[in-house]
Amino acid sequence: MRVVLNGEVIQLPEHVLFVSDILKQYEIHQRCVVVEVNGEIISRVEHQSTRLVDKDRIEIVHFVGGG
């Protein structure tokens, strides 16, 4: 399936079906990010149940600490 991830069109592997799968694919820890799919923020609880489909627009925002 082809999706837009942070503004870039990518082809996802066949095993990536849910938001949680894409986070695992890119080795992103769920506690440090906000995920938006098609303009809607997806709660951490919904990561495993939100299924991705062709042409979804996904934004992943990382939180970085520092001072």
Image (spheres, rainbow, N blue to C red):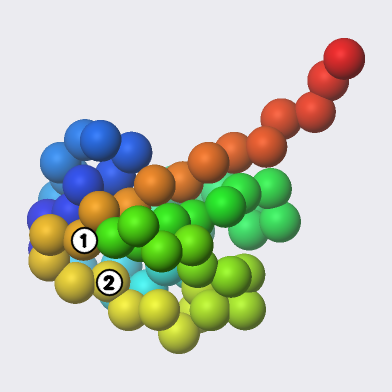
What residue do we see at 61% from left, 49% from top?
Answer: 33
Say if 20 sits above or below 50 in the image.
Answer: above
Q: Are marks 2 and 1 in contact (CB under 8 Å)?
A: yes
Q: Report the residue that reaches farthest toward the top.
A: 67
The residue pinned by badge 1 equals: 56
The residue pinned by badge 2 equals: 52
Classify residue 15 as left or right of residue 60: left
Classify residue 34 as left or right of residue 37: right
Mark pair 2, 1: CA separation: 7 Å
Helix, strand or loop at label 2? It is: loop
What residue do we see at 49% from left, 62% from top?
Answer: 41
Q: Quadrant of the C terminus?
A: top right
Residues packed near mark 2 inside 10 Å, few (<14), some (14 to 19) or many (20 plus): many
Residue 44 image offset from top left, x and y in percent: 62, 70
Residue 64 visible (yes or no): yes
Residue 16 image offset from top left, x and y in percent: 30, 67
Say if 46 sits above or below 43 in the image.
Answer: below
Residue 1 image offset from top left, x and y in percent: 12, 63
Q: Report the residue that reaches farthest toward the bottom.
A: 49
What residue do we see at 43% from left, 57% from top?
Answer: 36
Residues packed near mark 1 inside 10 Å, few (<14), some (14 to 19) or many (20 plus): some
| Amino acid on which disc 2 is placed | Leu
Residue 12 visible (yes or no): no
Classify residue 53 as left or right of residue 65: left
